[in-house]
Image (tube, rainbow, N blue to C red):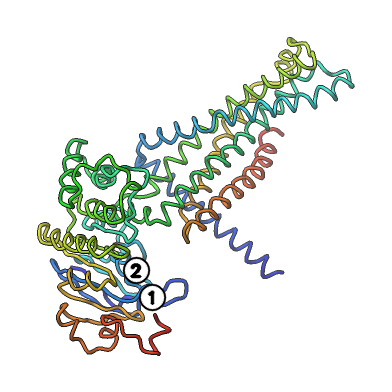
Amino acid sequence: MFKLLGSLVISFIDELGNITILGLRAMRSIVRGKVQMRNVIDQMAWLGVNSLAVSVTTAAFVGMVFATQIVTKFSKLGAISMVGGIVGLAVWRELAPILTAVVLAGRIGAAIAAELGSMKVTDQIDAMESMAVSPVDYLVAPRVLSCVFMLPVLIIFADLIGFLGGYFVSVFIFSVNPVSYFTSASTMLTVTDIWPGIFIKGPIFGLIISMIATYKGLSAKGGARGVGEVTTSAVVLALVSIFVSNYFLSQIIFR
Amino acid sequence: MIDFERVTKIFDSRLIIDNVDLTINKGEKVSIIGPSGCGKSTMLRLIIGLQPVTFGRVMIEGDDVAKLSSTGLAKLRLKFGMVFQSSALFDSLDVGKNVGFGLKQNTDYDDNKINKIVAEKLEMVGLAGIERTMPSELSGGMQKRVALARAIATSPKILLYDEPTTGLDPITSTVIENLINKLNAELDVTSIVVTHQLSTIYNTSDRIIMMHSGKLFEAGTPDEAKRNQNPIINHFLNGIVTPSERKEY
């Protein structure tokens, strides 16, 4: 029992150390200007186009279901005029950032891990290194940069669509006054409820997803099965890391 | 030019290369032969710094590979072209971009110049005009030839071939072997071929080195190798398996 626990702790620390080292190498590559902007832009376009529809759809329906729950309870308490503020608070502070990150971890994290894993097991990474091209400069750093920059952009869309999803359900299904929906949001919330979700949580979640996915991809071995294993573990580890870090970020930011 | 000095490689607690010395001179065509999994490919990976040695040192033109900085290692790798067993073509890039990859990343050449070199190298391997084809659309033999074109695109001094003919039919194998000889003659390079294919061993080598249980055995020229009485070399080249060797193979 203790042996198993010990080996799990050691393997966790080992992975964390390796991810940190890869992260530092990616940072060095970015700072030294070794990243080709064309690669970054390609990745951003791919990431944004592939994820926008699914992240705004998720945000819309989460905003709608959240508003449904809030309206039915708040109407009994006579606090229906506060619905807009509560939906805004939940969506902007927590739901939009974390759900966008979850969507990105599932779609982009898995895609990055599978792509790099497949390149690793077919010797393409070694071929790249043998041609004096660093996989960190060419593959890792552009993906990290694009995730760090694009996740906040996707969160902005999710914030907007999630809030409007709540508005749609509140106003058109539960007949909440549309003016009070916006008024409660503007009185209860300030800009400090919006920007940390976009500009603090977004880049951090983007960093977590991209670092875990690239590290897992580059550590793949053993053919197709190995690629499948690293893809699954990249998504699982990214999701757990996002939820854990979200708790601590919210404790720090919103206390 | 390439010196292995008392090199040992241990991988996952398994002794792969056991205290070997080897010198490969400029312009030589050396084949490293041996059974599958004996560590032949590891020799190539140690030369180009894709794996570190456990003990000893690998010297390339006087530089200790293990002591080079990342920039130094990158410069060293520009002297090499490597053909991988699986071809290792970048499957997201077309043939032209694969062949021109090293030039694009390591030189200031404009696209026109790179395209011209790519066309020239593809012509050399008999695949002119397939720049826009994706690797997945090519046969195994064609992929190997594209990998050859990619390896020579940056005009390296040393070519490393990891099982260049394994899995290919005899005709395609001969085509690749002829190409290796042609490139060696035309480009004045040093070639190191890792293989266990007899035709490749005999057709592409000036000197044959046998690897067995982590040790190296000098087998001589192809003619000398055929007459070599060392049982390890003799049995391998003639496909003789004694009861004691059965487990090892």
Instruction: Locate the N terminus of chain A by quadrant.
Output: bottom right
Residue flagged by tag 2: what amino acid is it?
Thr
Crowding at dot 2, Cα within 10 Å, few <14 / some 14-19 / many 20+, comes out as many
Give the image quarter of residue A32: top left
Distance from disc 2 to disc 1, alpha carbons, whole Å, reads 8 Å
| Neighbours of disc 1 within 10 Å: few (<14), some (14-19), many (20+) | many
Q: Is residue B156 left or right of residue A16?
A: left
Measured along the vertical axis of the image, is residue B219 above or below residue A1? Answer: below
Residues at badges 2 and 1 in contact (C-beta under 8 Å)?
yes
Number of the label disc, if any, that sits on residue A162: none
- Residue drawn where x is 67% and y is 19% of the image: A164
The location of residue B9, given as percent across then percent down, is: 37, 73
Sequence-first tag of 2 and 1: 1
Q: Position of residue A113 (x, y in %)?
A: 50, 48
Q: Measuring 15% from the left and 45% from the top, which residue is drawn there?
A: B120
Q: Which residue is mark 1?
A: B16
Judging by the rendered image, the residue that carries numbered circle 2 is B42
Residue type at numbered disc 1: Ile
Quadrant in which residue A202 is drawn: top right
- Rendering coords of residue A48 (x, y %): 49, 31
